[in-house]
Amino acid sequence: MTDDTTKNGPDATAADAAADAAAYVENDIAQEEAAQPDPLELLKAENGELRDRYLRLAAEMDNLRRRTEREVKDAKSYSVAGFARDMLAVSDNLRRALDAISPETKAAADAGLSTLIEGVEMTERAMLSALERHGVRKLEPVGQKFDPNFHQAMFEVPNPDVPNNTVVQVVQAGFTIGERVLRPAMVGVAKGGPKPAEAETNSVFDEKDA
């Protein structure tokens, strides 16, 4: 058997096939390795996703904490609103009783009546002071611009000396509790005067002329 026969015989064919198969397998493995992502990059991506989840969860928990604190604060501030509103009705009756006593009657009152009047006045002050300690405060709207959020207009008073829509009289006191209106003040407002902006302009010109 010659060398050419050996090179081109069955053994050579088998060797070539084996070499081709090995090359194919190596190429396939190389492609799979190239297709697979880097484990380090996978770990970085997973860490980034976990960090995003943590940040979102932390933000949600912070919002929940703030909302809970606000709700608890509101509950504490406004839980006495109904009771305070009822106590204002009692305070109104005390004020009406005091207003019904004329100055002449007070001046001519004997010791018993004077003591009674003083007792009613002290009761009114003590009640308002107790309400104030629980966040209830009296509005002082006279001289202020009418605000429908805090005032309820009952009538108009012709008065050209003050800006239009200025509160000039209080019929019933108003109160707030915290940042909310417990009861609007019933007021009378000025009519016929200049508008607030015009009044400010006129006052500036008056100061310059002076």
Image (cartoon, grey):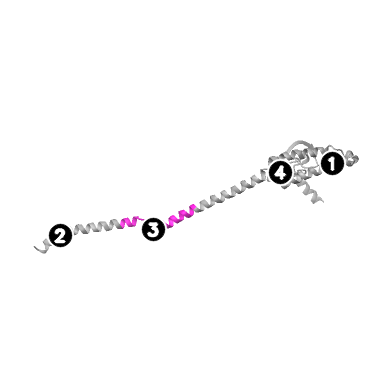
- Badge 1: residue crowd in 10 Å (few <14, some 14–19, many ≥20): some
Gap in angstroms between the C-alphas marked 4 and 1: 28 Å
Query: Which three-letter amino acid code belongs to the residue tagged 4?
Result: Thr
Instruction: Say which residue label 3 marks.
Output: 39
Specify the quadrant of the image occupied by residue 168.
top right
Query: Which three-letter amino acid code belongs to the residue tagged 2?
Result: Asp
The quarter of the image holding the N terminus is bottom left
Q: Nearer the viewer, mark 1 or mark 2?
A: 1
Instruction: Say which residue label 1 marks.
Output: 117
Q: Is residue 36 magenta?
A: yes
Instruction: Say which residue label 2 marks.
Output: 11
In this image, 147 relative to 44: left or right? right
Gap in angstroms between the C-alphas marked 1 and 2: 131 Å
Gap in angstroms between the C-alphas marked 2 and 4: 105 Å
Residue 4 at x, y percent in the picture: 12, 62
Residue 197 at x, y percent in the picture: 73, 44
Q: Nearer the viewer, residue 188 or 105?
A: 105
Instruction: Say which residue label 4 marks.
Output: 176
Query: Which three-letter amino acid code belongs to the residue tagged 1?
Result: Ile
Gap in angstroms between the C-alphas marked 2 and 3: 43 Å
Give the residue at x 71% y 43%: 176
Which numbered disc, 3 or 4, marks the residue that appears first in the sequence? Answer: 3
Q: Nearer the viewer, mark 2 or mark 3?
A: 3
Q: Secondary structure at mark 3?
A: helix
- Can residue 190 be seen? no
* Magenta region, residue range: 30-53
Query: Which three-letter amino acid code belongs to the residue tagged 3?
Result: Pro
Give the residue at x 89% y 42%: 111
Q: Secondary structure at mark 4?
A: strand
Q: Secondary structure at mark 1?
A: helix
In this image, 2 relative to 128: left or right? left
Q: Secondary structure at mark 2?
A: helix
